[in-house]
Amino acid sequence: MKTVRPVGLCGYGAYVPRLRIDARSIAKIWGRLGRGFPVAEKSFPGADEDTITMSIEAARGAVARAGIDPRKLSAVWVGTESKPYAVKPSSTVVAEAIGATPFVNAADLEFACKAGSEAMQMAAAFVGSGMAEYAMAIGMDTAQGKPGDELEYTAAAGGAAYVFGPAESAAARLVASRSFVTDTADFFRRAHMRYPEHGMRFTGKPAYFHHTLGCARALLEETGLKPSDFRWAVFHQPNPRFPREAAEELGFAPEQFEKSLVCKRIGNTYAGSSLLGLAAVLDVASPGERIFMVSYGSGAGSDGFVFETTENVALRRGDAPSVDCLLDRRQPVTEYARYLHNAGKIRTH
Amino acid sequence: MRDVYIAGMGQTRIGELWDRSLKDLAVEAALKALAEAQATTADCLIVGNMLSGELASQENLGVFVADSAGLTPVEAVKVESACSSGGAAFREGYLRVASGAAESALVVGVEKMSDLLPDAVSSGLALAADGDSENLHGATFVALNALIMRRYMHENGYKHEDFSGFAINAHRNAASNEDAMFPRAVTAKDYAKSCMVASPINLLDSSAISDGAAAVLLSARPKPGVRPIRVTGSGAATDTIAVAARKDPLWLSAAEASARRAFAQAGLKPEDVDLFELHDAFCIMAALSLEAGGFAPRGKGVRLAMEGEIGPTGKVPIATRGGLKARGHPVGATGVLQIVDAAVQLRGGAGASQVPGARVAMTQNIGGSGSSVYTHILAAGD
Amino acid sequence: MELPRFHRLRGTLYRLEGSRCEDCGALSFPARQVCPSCSSRKSLLHRFKGAGTLWSFSELYQLQRGYPKDVPNVIGLVKLDEGPMLLTQITDAEPEDLSIGMRVQMVTRLIRSTGEAGPRVYGYKFRPVVGG
């Protein structure tokens, strides 16, 4: 899919909370010491943080890097599966906080881990159709892992915000985008349940890989590009293993995708995952480099994008903290109880 | 304006009084004051109280006390000024008599704080702070004082233990006050071990939640047969409600202004004062009150405590019957309790904590974190 | 539930909006109707940048109802670079890392929530500066 007018990423901002819980502290309680962990530690939010506060911070970074008056945004869309309110948009708080109100569209999106990337595709379309000058897409989560479940080791907090605008002033222009969606119930959460259910091994081949690879191949075919035409590749990262396998299956090499594997240090930020990976790449990319990005969300589907950095890629890069800066900002916690307390998992009534 | 005398006074015990209601406390104090004055009523009733609505589900307090004390149809009103409600009520009564509008005024300060849980009381007290810019952000009363104390320590080079003299003095004086909430001595060691409430303020730096009432009958004529106690000075002033908005958060400018007005009216200076019943809700307030009142230079209020000059025989006796710290601080009642404590001293009735030869007493009641201050000067004799 | 009150406060809480006196230029946070310097009643909206210095702080062990009970809970007075001082919670810091005079920056966080059914009140807090 291509837009009518050229669009690109004019600004981006990332956010990761500073708290980290190590896998060993979780494993101790559940009798799982001695087994390997997908990641050594994961990020979790402070008691005064949630998807809204984190989105606001990422959005402020994106606006700063875009160098625009926030009133020029015609949309603020937040994709998440950890909405603080089941009914009441997170996006209105973000729009209000960054000064984009009142002439703005705001909405929250849900599609598990691809809620952020589909907001990106929509923002690209909003600008690309000529309806908007600028539109913001955010993917952010404070992922909830069921206590004692294996996903608890990776369900993390973080994400990023993107301002789409005219390609002429972009840090990276959008070349093409594609989506690949089927109804596949590999992982889900019913409305009044606190924690999701998942199909364990069913979440692999028929879910993550089927959609990621299906989307990736279609996008490569549409654009006539090969993996070697790209400098960077970003995939959804529920753990370090899945994206590496998908990348290698498609023909990408580690020097293309390792930089984006933020999950190695903080775990799976769900709707923020591939968006954070993209931000990590944009932090170091040089002009004229192609970026391949394919997200994945359970339910299931993938959104794919081909970007090409412009000579403006580093223009206002310093106006917001880099992903590395956020990853390095760590307050390690080794008390599982403190993590449970902050995540609201200890019931006092 | 004509002279106004304290014709009678009374108070209840101060403490966690599970068996006494707001009504019980107010009536006890009111009737004691009237009895001591050998009066059956007054021309007006002024009730000082801060949180009757929040903590005792009762407003319309003027009527409530008048009715319960059998004083209707006397005119009655509640006066509120946060923790200086008692001082404000006293000034109100004083002005009515001094101006000639009334021959007598019964001033009752009362507070019932122990019926609700501590976090509800804390939330109630926080209503004295600025709602949108302080209270909303979680500032409890202790927190506001703690912010001031830490900065004060930082700017003046004090350690926490330098403040211990305030608690030690207050508790020692409370031992001779049978109505005091904490008539037990505390030592420097107790102070050092005391747990933090809001750093750097610990439990022994703070006054406790308490119930109690006090009443004073003000009259244009002195009580016959006893040494007359005259209100020679009365002054009040305000500062910004929020600490952050103060031009100088480490200076109690409302305390300074109200003290100046009281001194001016009385024709007196700080050196003339024999005892100062200041507002020691937190020891930092005590230090700042000494400075604002002109008893110590700026930044040196703590030195008076460190050098032992705040005891009954010191340069500036304070909290002579326990103060807010050890006698107790049922907030709306405190301003009137301070008057009672001062009057007891002026009558020579303070026992082991008597200030020798006390003739002139100053009381100062602070509302909020220094935002609304009432200063009174009482003189014994003619 | 106080919904209208928090709605009125959103400019102040989310965007650090105060006022600037039209006559003498004095800045106030929060906004004031009467200028504290010249008593003028004419003022304009002024958005503060959110950078400042920590003037004082305190670690609270007793909290009001409804405040996120993170460990620890720190309150502070911050002097904004533009002049006015404000009271705020200090977040993202262990108390031992705080010192009077350190540089801090505004973030938007959950200030208060009343149980699982009530509204969530977001607003300014300050933290030690992140990034450069």
Image (cartoon, coloured by chain):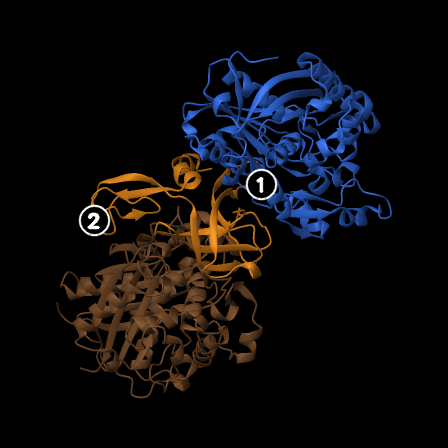
Characterize the local packing of mark 2: few (<14), some (14-19) or many (20 or more) Cα atoms within 10 angstroms. Answer: few
Q: Residue furthest right?
A: A34
Name the element at disc 2: loop
Name the element at disc 1: loop
Q: Quadrant of residue B84?
A: bottom left
Identified at 62% across, 43% down, the residue is A324
Q: Nearer the viewer, residue A235 or A58?
A: A235
Can you say which quadrant of the picture contains the C terminus of chain B?
A: bottom left
Which residue is label 1 attached to?
A322
Characterize the local packing of mark 1: few (<14), some (14-19) or many (20 or more) Cα atoms within 10 angstroms. Answer: many
Colour assigned to chain A in the rendering is blue
Q: Is residue B301 visible?
A: yes
Judged left or right of residue A198, residue C52 is left
The amino acid on which the numbered mark 1 sits, given as a three-letter code, is: Ser
Res. C39 mark: 2
Colour assigned to chain B in the rendering is brown
Which chain is assigned orange?
C
Task: Report the chain holding disc 2.
Answer: C
